[in-house]
Image: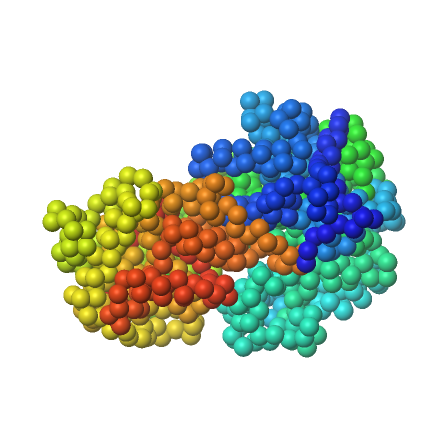
Amino acid sequence: MADTASSSFLQFVEILTPKETFRLRECGGTEGRPGRLPQPRGLASQAMRWTYVLRARERWLGMGNAQLAHEADAAATLHDFGVNDAALQRLARATRVVVRMPYRSEGVGWAARIFPWEYVIAAATRRYRRAADRHFTVMRELGMSRRPAWKPNRRGAGLLFVHSAPGGLRKEWSFDDELRRITAALGNIEIEVLADPTLEQLEEKVRSMRPELVHLSGFDNLQGLKALRDIAQARELVEVEAGAQRLTDLLANERYVPDGMLLAGEKCGVAVVSALRLAAALGAGGHRAYFVGVSTQNSAARTSALLVGQRAALASVGFQDAVENALIDYFFELIYTQLSNTDPTAWNLPLAFEQAWLSTRQKPDATRATGIALWAGAPLMHPRGMRHAEARPAELLQADVAPYLQCVPEKELNYSVLHNNGPLFSKFVIQRGNAAEGDSLDIDVELHLGAESARYRRRFKADETPFYDLANEVHVPLTASLMRSCHEAVNSALVVQLSHNDKLLSRETYRLRLLPVDQWRDNDKDGQWLPSFVLPRDPAVIRAVEQAQHYVRVLRDNPAAGFEGYQAAPTAEEEQLLAVDLQVQAVWAALVHEWQLGYINPPPTYSSNLDSQRLRTPSSVLGGRSGTCIDLALMFAACLELIDIYPVIFLLNGHALPGYWRHHAFQDDYRTLRTTSVGATATTVGEAAADSSGSRQQYSWQALGPGAYREIRELIQARQLVPIETVRLTEHCGFVEAIESGIAALAEAQDFHSVLDLVTARVDGITPLPIVGGSE
């Protein structure tokens, strides 16, 4: 939907501090109107571009040069909006910053609402705040015709806790601990629970209860559908606003899955509920809650904004991107503790948010979040009680309970996960409880492997931290021979225990299925480990490169030519890039003429999961003179890696093929997401109702979703990245024809899943598995 402004509605955005207001240049006016932002750096394109940059932050986070470049770009973006360096310096001295924008409807002004103001303002002012170690809190305000006061409607306000895991998701996820923590934080505030409601049931509950506080917990629509895909039948029907659709069809066009929340369906087990329909249900009967906390990922851009804009809530908090569940729970616990310690007539939600955010951003995991967004329908800069109150870290009341452990282990595991220090647990959080500072807490995790075992043990001293999230720290050693030699699935056990001051508090045993060392799972949990199956030291790869030596000399018309990788191209001039192309072509020629390969189906997995596949090593491919599309892609990528030409693997729906960077500078620009690169203009087309989370990049080496597809297509069109259809090896076709087939395979956005960049994976420690040869 186009973002247009009529003559009766002038879209504006203001940045407010306690001392001054910065009116941004007019956005969304008619063509030729004075002050219109130049294209392509208008608000809509900037909103989509910055959303994509932050979705892909795992690619560049931690790279100092990239972060500095993005800080400079953030400042340039605000310059385009009329905020110059002098204004940025004054902004950096503020303690609170409010971004105010109007609201008329969902389709008007959407670009300003999805723009990641928190990050861009913080990044643009960081150079001025760094020396003085200053921090500020960014909040968002929707300007509407009627501006209510900051107060609840009645005394003794209650909270409605809605948790939704429909369609079998509840078998995998539980909200018991979240409910317990919220109940403890609320103190004497009444709480009612509504589990897995339909939209109609949610509306009826709001009409009857009229809660002042609402807490929504569960899944945003796209996240929930992807989780459902792993446990449901492919043809399962899902309710959407227009009727019912198959789950696979919805995910094939995921950019059309709206932001919102997954609820139970009236006729199907699951319903996709848009943010607008959710707001209508929570505002049933003209009710307007004081605060709605949306404890789902990707809820800030539309879900929380529309709850406020549609007058279902005076204020709402949502998350701009994916955030660790433990961090979300901690943040809301702080918010509710602050409110419960105050008489409802004196509630100050903006101050409670500021204090909770001040504490939350001090947690290590907060660096992985792009922002927690507070949306308000009432004035934020000087709400009652906030003018003189100073923000301070919020404190939790420690419940009089012993420390306890919340853990959710993976049900299936293979060697590639352990090899790359992947998580054994999707959740592993120790709640400190009443442990005093200095008390000892001990964790013991043991994985049974036949006559051997692999063990993780840790003792640490409790401090003021209320919880410890160890999901990414619990790893077991790889010395047990069973893990390295497992060629069929084996049922095992995982034992976890927690002790406090040497007193055993809990001991749990979980079933675990160990997958064969050569088995890969093509899903959102394990798909990212595919680079470990690229084996450049496999004997067959070494043999292929040796055979290609003859071809590279002929193709380059030089008896002394060899495989020197990018040394053959000191610059990115086209003439020099051809020397890189000819090295790749030489490998192709050797495989076509020397190996004489055919196609074969994958080996059996004996698994009920359709996402599992046994992968052949290059030696197995050579031994059998055949392979699947992914076997051939991995083998060709290994050959390129051996000659120091940077490969990638494209994953499509039901297909895989490799590619390569024509110059190391192209890969470097891609890794750092430099705005001068061709990919900088990707995703500049947006829609008011489109899902905002499809291109989230969870791992630095894997880019996925519609935004990544557009970026990759631009790189291919600019002849920086070259795809190769390696199935054409089995048809003995030429190199140019294979490239043309590779480009054709990537022609449709709905076929694209992701691209894995091998050199980024290697830099981040994703190394080849210790597999040589291999059998089927």
Q: Position of residue 479 (x, y in %)?
A: 27, 53
Residue that sits furthest to the left in the current view = 559
Q: Is residue 685 above or below residue 94?
A: below
Residue that sits furthest to the top in the current view = 132
Q: 57 or 613: nearer the eye? A: 57
Colour mapping used in the image = rainbow
Q: Which residue is at 46% across, 43% downward? A: 677
Q: Which quarter of the figure is the N terminus placed in?
A: bottom right
Q: In which quarter of the image is residue 65?
A: top left
Q: Is residue 276 above or below residue 596?
A: above
Q: Position of residue 193 (x, y in %)?
A: 73, 60
Total marks in image: 0
Q: Which residue is at 46% across, 53% downward? A: 714
Q: Where is residue 194 in the image (x, y as percent from the top left)?
A: 72, 63
Q: Can see residue 313?
A: no
Residue 226 located left or right of residue 634: right
Q: Where is residue 327 in the image (x, y as percent from the top left)?
A: 58, 46
Residue that sits furthest to the front in the current view = 32
Q: Can see residue 147?
A: yes
Q: In this view, does 19 lie above or below 259?
A: above
Q: In which quarter of the image is residue 54?
A: top right
Residue 314 located left or right of residue 320: right
Q: In this view, does 370 lie above or below 731?
A: above
Q: Which residue is at 63% across, 70% downward? A: 270
Q: Which residue is at 71% across, 38% downward? A: 35
Q: Which quarter of the figure is the C terminus placed in?
A: bottom left
